[in-house]
Image: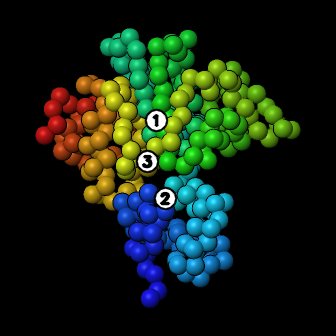
Amino acid sequence: MAWDYNFFAQKIYELTTIDLISYKERQMKRRINSLITRSGFNSYEEYYNELVLNSELLDEFVGYITINVSEFFRNPKQWEVLETIVIPTLIQKHDKLKIWSAACSTGEEPYSLAMMLNKFKPSLKDVRIIATDIDKDVLTRAQIGLYNEKSLENLPKDLKEKYFSKVEDDKWYKIDRRIIDCVEFKQHDLLKDPYPQNCHLIMCRNVMIYFTEEAKTKLYKKFYESLHDDGIFFVGSTEQIILPQRYNFEPVETFFYRKCDTLG
């Protein structure tokens, strides 16, 4: 019997604990079929059998399906709101901040945040930034802190000069060790792992669009529980929450939601 997509997804869950069924099937199936064909395999079963035997192929598969696309200060106007409204409000209310950058990919988002916060708190000793991703390989790259020119397109010139140095024939930029040391990287699966608690700000951007509606409902409730009583949830530019009151969030700015007192 030929394997179908659902059976392949079940086998992948057994192998990696990544739940493909919680991702939108049409998008994920298209990506996986393209990868299988490009890799020279003719069926889900043939490809899976090689994944079991070949750790490098398995790492490539995990990296591909987790869709790692990032850059510094992605969607700059949203970062302006974060800097001028959200962060000052949080600092006014709290002496210490705990911030979670979920699905952080190669680290551009949490490092952008650290550079921004450095303007408000020069030592950053009262700020804890946790950055997580399901893909351990991108976390390794994030901790190295080496980026190409494209990743820095939206980076303000003053921050580029202050926190980056050119390396390897000017093709790459190394971020300052002071910024790397501000971020605590951890491997984390949004669908199954426990969430950090009492976060004053959670950033989960350009990830939720890949999940099914059922999965998103579960994740919104888990993000709610992860936030401090008046914490802020920052989503991506295509991920506005429809009827946020269902999850006891209230909009404070576009793409920013505050946790309400009680979950209904």
Q: Position of residue 14 (x, y in %)?
A: 44, 63
| Depth check, front residue: 149 or 213 | 213
Quadrant where the N terminus sits is bottom left
Q: Is label 2 in a helix, a strand or a loop?
A: helix
Q: Quadrant of residue 63?
A: bottom right
Residue under label 2: 16
Q: Residue at x 40, y 54 (%)?
A: 209
What residue occupies the far bottom of the structure in this picture?
1
Q: Which residue is mark 1?
A: 101
Q: Quadrant of residue 82?
A: top left
Q: Which mark is residue 189?
A: 3
Residue mark closest to the camera, 1 vs 3:
3
**Tag 3 near tag 2, CB within 8 Å:** no
Farthest residue, direction left: 264
Query: Dot 3: what SS?
Result: loop
Marking on residue 194: none
